[in-house]
Amino acid sequence: MTRSMTRPPAGILLATLALACTLASPVAGAEGSIAELFDGRLPNNFPFLNNAGTAATFSTAGFVDLTNPFHVPQGTNGRSCESCHLPQVGWSIRPIDVELKFLLTQGNDPIFNALDANNPNPDVSSLQAKRASYSMLRKGLFRRGGAIQPTFEFEIFAFDDPLGAGASPTQVQAFRRPLATANFHIAKNIGWHDQNTNGSGDVYAGLFAQADGNITGAQQGPRATPATLDSIATYELGLAFAQQFSFSAGLLTACGAKGGPENLSAQPSAKGPFDLFDAWKNLRPGSCGTRSADRKRAQIARGQDIFNSVNANNNRSCNGCHDAVNNGSNVDGRLFDVGASQARFRKAGMPLYTMRNKTTLLTRETTDPGRALRSGRWTDMDRFKTPSLRGIVARAPYFHNGIAANLTEAVRHYETALEFKYSDQEREDLVAFLEAL
């Protein structure tokens, strides 16, 4: 068997590092600098460094169009869709990205807007006060909420709102991570609690509605033209993002593996197990590349099997919810309660609500009621979207509220909340697989 390359050419790594430095420039902001660097066209499969290797985007348009209205402010406050969905970090944003924006602009980047401050009336009288007022945003968490309608099956019985986010007997405010705006070609819903699509499964219509709401809301602009909204929705539908290279295993397409964004872009929506790394099962060290790289490849394949298999301790599998083949979203668009909103996982600054069922008078505590905030149904409490897992290593922290700082913590959360049970080796294998997605 031909030995495969286990590391990208030095020129690619240098280009990636140079790009990272460019993106940190405070002169034009991320939106301006990345577009100018590539003259508005980011090449397909261009690598971006992350903790496990490099990830990339593949667009069905032939290149990533950085002049698309997605990347251009449409409103009055300088924000664009890209402000919170950066192509270099998996089309989401990390706490370090927000911290850099704060540091390089003294808190004056458009992302620092009262809309997403700790509370609706932030103190911005000094740099220190501004830093405190955006403490949750600096963790990559955005303030979101909604009203409890009289028709809902539940009510707010009590609440604790340490940062004055705006909670009230009829109003929920919570802090959420921005979902990745890629891999929508294998999706049935858009937002964390199915806003915009509302169970219809019409992802294009959902993206169209989301862009409309983002421009009139987060960007504080007038309603965009249908042509602009269509351009944004169509653009997002064409983006596939995934890990392409592993520092330990090399190229994720080596020796018959099917990783990387280009393969993902052609993946149809279907229910079933992951098979990206079937070719690496029981790989003999030295048969594909270096012995160390092949050992890592075999570990990734073991992690894939663990992901697909039923766990003996709880009779569940990761693939049971993340059932879209080689993507990890849910084919039917189902939302699940994985315990991330439970009071025991509450982080500092998060509001806590005691919800009461109007009929049974049962109560439960939650930091974010999820789908129930839109449907009004008690059974939807704490249910959230099953997101795509591709390129996940690029966009920590995890879950809708960022309670897991890394993939190991994410796996341990499932062990605590849903009674999965793994040995240390199984946990390491599972994380290795997730890092290769």
Image (cartoon, rainbow, N blue to C red):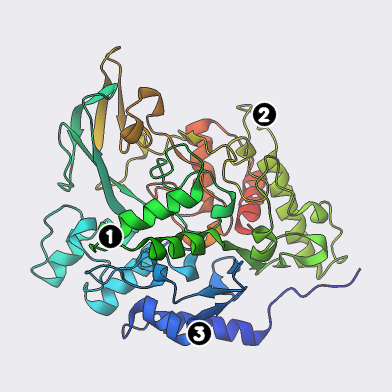
Task: Left or right? Give the position of 215 relative to 20.
Answer: left
Q: CA distance from mark 3 to mark 1?
A: 29 Å
**Label drawn at residue 223:** 1
Residue position for label 3: 38
SS at mark 3 in the image: loop
Return the disc, 2 or 3, that comes first in the chain's sequence. 3
Split into 4 quadrants, where in the image is the N terminus? Answer: bottom right
The residue sitting at the left extreme is: 125
Q: Splitting the image into 4 quarters, where does residue 273 fall?
A: top right
Q: CA distance from mark 2 to mark 1?
A: 52 Å
Amino acid type indicated by mark 1: Arg
Q: Residue shown at 62%/46% (left/top)?
A: 427
Q: Please tell me whether residue 273 is drawn above or below residue 121 in the rendered image.
A: above
Residue position for label 2: 312
Return the disc, 2 or 1, that comes first in the chain's sequence. 1
Nearer to me, 412 or 64: 64
Discs 2, 1 touching: Cβ within 8 Å: no
SS at mark 2 in the image: loop
Q: Residue shown at 35%/31% (left/top)?
A: 375
Split into 4 quadrants, where in the image is the C terminus? Answer: bottom right
